[in-house]
Image (cartoon, coloured by chain):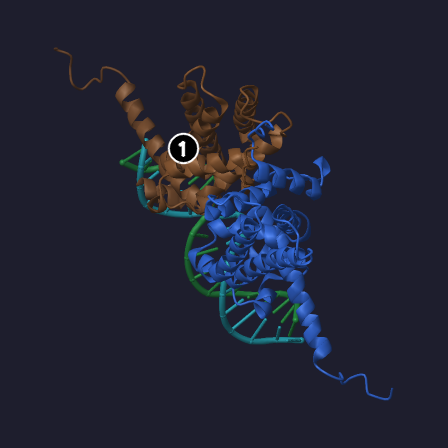
Chain colours: A blue, B brown, C green, D cyan
Amino acid sequence: MASPETIPVSDAPLDSRAEATRRRVLDVAARLFRERGYAGVSLRAIAAAAGLKAGSLYYHFDSKEALVVEILDEGIRAVHEAVEQAVSALPADADGATLLETAIRAHLESLLRLSDYTSANVRVFGQAPEPVRRRSLAVRRAYDACWDALLAEAQARGAIRADADLRAARLLLLGALNASLEWFEPRRGGVEALAARYADLLWHGLAPRPAAA
Amino acid sequence: MASPETIPVSDAPLDSRAEATRRRVLDVAARLFRERGYAGVSLRAIAAAAGLKAGSLYYHFDSKEALVVEILDEGIRAVHEAVEQAVSALPADADGATLLETAIRAHLESLLRLSDYTSANVRVFGQAPEPVRRRSLAVRRAYDACWDALLAEAQARGAIRADADLRAARLLLLGALNASLEWFEPRRGGVEALAARYADLLWHGLAPRPAAA
DNA sequence: GTCTATATGCCGATAGAC
DNA sequence: GTCTATCGGCATATAGAC
């Protein structure tokens, strides 16, 4: 009550204000990178969108490359956590088909609805400078491994035929899901509906079911 | 026989030398755009790779945007022709599954083996400036329509179940095929093998075949 | 922490010589 | 047809005031 206003009680408030600015910069940068790609976004544009000047960014980040690496890693982390969380919320005896559809829905929701970081990843990684790609590789590999484990588990539960090439399946599946970023429009139908449609197509395929004997 | 050497018999040779330069520029630009995206490639880099100076490009093209539009359209044209040609080479009574696998293989070959123009398309379109996207839309729509017709035909021949959502199938299929550009390495196995694996996964799906009764 | 000012260099595009 | 030279502008990054 009697503490002088001129002396902050701790550094925490100052630190968290810096943290808030830093987070705001990351948020607007993720959105801009998602829209225009790595080379298409200038630090000036990011600074302006975050309400500060270009030079001030260097208080928070060492370089444009360091900034984008942080966004790429955060994007993979976000979708990885979303998928793991959704899957672990299932009953332990859920069947393989439910497992697949749940993971597909969680991935699409992170990509299309929740996270500019995740979608920035899909757009930026392929054409980022080589040092950026190299520094993001480990996080990406871990997410690929998460899907390989998911597919193996679904196979163990009898939802995937024994002779399927699981690596090819993972590449096809994630490629198809990520590509939806290029055309998905929420007003044409929600993420839920898309996830259901894709899960069905990927699981049953295009071929007609053999007639019951 | 006695015509003076100092007078060219026609303008054709001169014209075709300009045409050759123009084609060389388009070829190297397609490769660079494929690797680095639209904003990641400068006209100076294109000129250097084609063996001339930046200013000279303006003799052949009005602007960077005009150049990239030409590459995008050529890329769609190339894959569209490859697919139509491959399909029309099939016997008239080919079954629907053969039709699908043939189209998938032709698309992947154009994307991964034959045409920098086609692969530049996948990388560049999504983040090109809006006027560029607008000017390329018609050609893209025509290729989408080609696949819609293909899928409808396969359905008519009994290779696709009657209740399938053909638009979703087209988006999933082309999304998965185009994504292979991001990871495909020829030394891990050829385009042929990839096409066969993908056609099988897309047609049969991941689910085990129901046991015969 | 954020500012202004600036260093240094590349960008797309144009003008005019050859 | 291609060159050199150059325009005005924007890029990343840094220095130092406040």
Q: Position of residue A29 (x, y in %)?
A: 61, 56
Which image quadrant for residue B93?
Answer: top left
Q: Callout 1, which amino acid?
A: Ser
> Which quarter of the image is occupied by the C terminus of chain B?
top right
When the figure is inspected, residue B71 is found, relative to residue A39, above or below; the finding is: above
Q: Position of residue A154 (x, y in %)?
A: 57, 50
Left or right, residue D12 beside residue A17: left
Q: Position of residue A129 (x, y in %)?
A: 45, 55
Chain letter of the residue carrying label 1: B
Q: Is residue A33 visible?
A: no
When the figure is inspected, residue B134 is found, relative to residue A20, above or below; the finding is: above
Q: Could you say which is closer to the camera, residue A91 or residue B83?
A: A91
Left or right, residue A115 beside residue A72: right
Q: Position of residue B106 (x, y in %)?
A: 42, 29
Identify which residue is drawn at 68% across, 52% down.
Answer: A114
Identify which residue is drawn at 50% across, 38% down.
Answer: B201
Identify which residue is drawn at 62% across, 58% down.
Answer: A84
> Which quarter of the image is occupied by the N terminus of chain B?
top left
Task: Say which residue label 1 marks.
Answer: B110
